[in-house]
Image: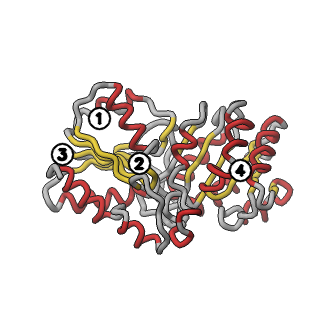
Amino acid sequence: MKENNQIQSRFVGLSSREAFGKVIVELGEQNENIVALSADLADSVKLNDFIKKFPDRFINFGVAEQNMMGAAAGLTLAGKIPFACTYAVFSSMRACEQVRTDIAYNGLPVKIVSTHSGISFGVAGATHQAIEDIGIYRSMAGMTVISPADGVETAAVIRAAVDLDGPVYVRLSRVKEKTVYNQDFDYAIGKPDLVRSGSDVLLIATGAQVGETLDAAELLAEQSVAAGVLNVSTIKPINPSDFVDLLTDFPVVLTIEQHNVINGLGSAIAEIIAENNLNIRFKRHGLYDIFTTSGPYQELLAYYQLDPKGIHDTVIRFLDGI
């Protein structure tokens, strides 16, 4: 687990999008080339403080996500560092072609920060819940895909992303995630983090599901199941050598994500297992190729068995061979 000797981070208790809103102001003070872009959602993506501080470095494109992505590409060519911010479902679907062709194809260092990912925008229903975005972005050549676990990790991710030479998609939640990290740390893009040790089963999670999975591991411990929890915030690029030795330490591995199980985190781990001929019992847990329904976030977590009890029950059934 990442630690240092600093005092508790001031990002503890903030949602990932709230942490983003604060850290982009800090970065803007350090680098005048940083600009923020939004598609009529500045308040939702927490850019208000940046706008107050740097009104001349913010552009609102209205409900025109495609134009925003095209302009972001052009801004990099003018020497700027654009943060293009909207909901995950809009950046991955409404502006998919522009991201692929204008940004990814040209390898441009646009920072795409998307909030309301997964089922976190629960009451909005299937049209506004982003459960395909990881798959869309990880299939774009040269695209880095990061899904931080909480506000503290988000701040570290955004700091690291500023200097990344190439496009990056940062996937944030709408709700306040459970606390995973208490202290600031230097984030290394591409490195998984074992946040809980274990021996019986390894639970690999990303984004908001890391905190839920840690709580599930506590429930499993009450039944004498020693579950390790691995935070994989960088879903792409993934270096198989960072995983193979760890995976072989466990007889059973499950992935947990707020995403379609097809082409998400689970698929990325399955590729490592298959291509390295690892003899492991493996299961992907998430949204099983369905369209979601609407409802309060916590109720949806329980409904899709992505809350601690649901994860616990899924693990137990799998261990029992059901």
Tell me the kind of residue under disc 1: Leu
Dividing the picture into quadrants, the one containing residue 222 is bottom left
The residue wearing badge 3 is 200
The residue wearing badge 2 is 261
Q: Earlier in the sequence, mark 3 or mark 2?
A: 3
Q: Earlier in the sequence, mark 2 or mark 1?
A: 1
279 to 30, vertically: above or below: above
The residue wearing badge 1 is 246
Q: Do the residues labelled 3 and 4 touch (CB within 8 Å)?
A: no
Tag nearer the camera, 2 or 1 = 2
Tell me the kind of residue under disc 4: Ala
10 Å crowding of disc 3: few (<14), some (14-19), many (20+): some
Dividing the picture into quadrants, the one containing residue 213 is bottom left
Q: Earlier in the sequence, mark 1 or mark 4?
A: 4
Residue 250 horizontal/vertical position (percent): 22, 39
User: In the rendering, which numbered label is found on residue 288?
Assistant: none
Secondary element at image label 2? loop
Residue 55 horizontal/vertical position (percent): 83, 60
Tell me the kind of residue under disc 3: Asp
The residue wearing badge 4 is 84
Position of 306 with respect to 134 (left or right) is left
10 Å crowding of disc 2: few (<14), some (14-19), many (20+): many
Secondary element at image label 4? strand
Q: Can residue 33 be seen in this view?
A: no
Secondary element at image label 3? loop
Q: How far apart are marks 3 and 2 (CA)?
A: 23 Å
Q: Earlier in the sequence, mark 3 or mark 4?
A: 4
Q: Distance between the residues labelled 1 and 4?
A: 35 Å
Residue at the spot 66% in from the left edge and 33% down from the top edge: 166
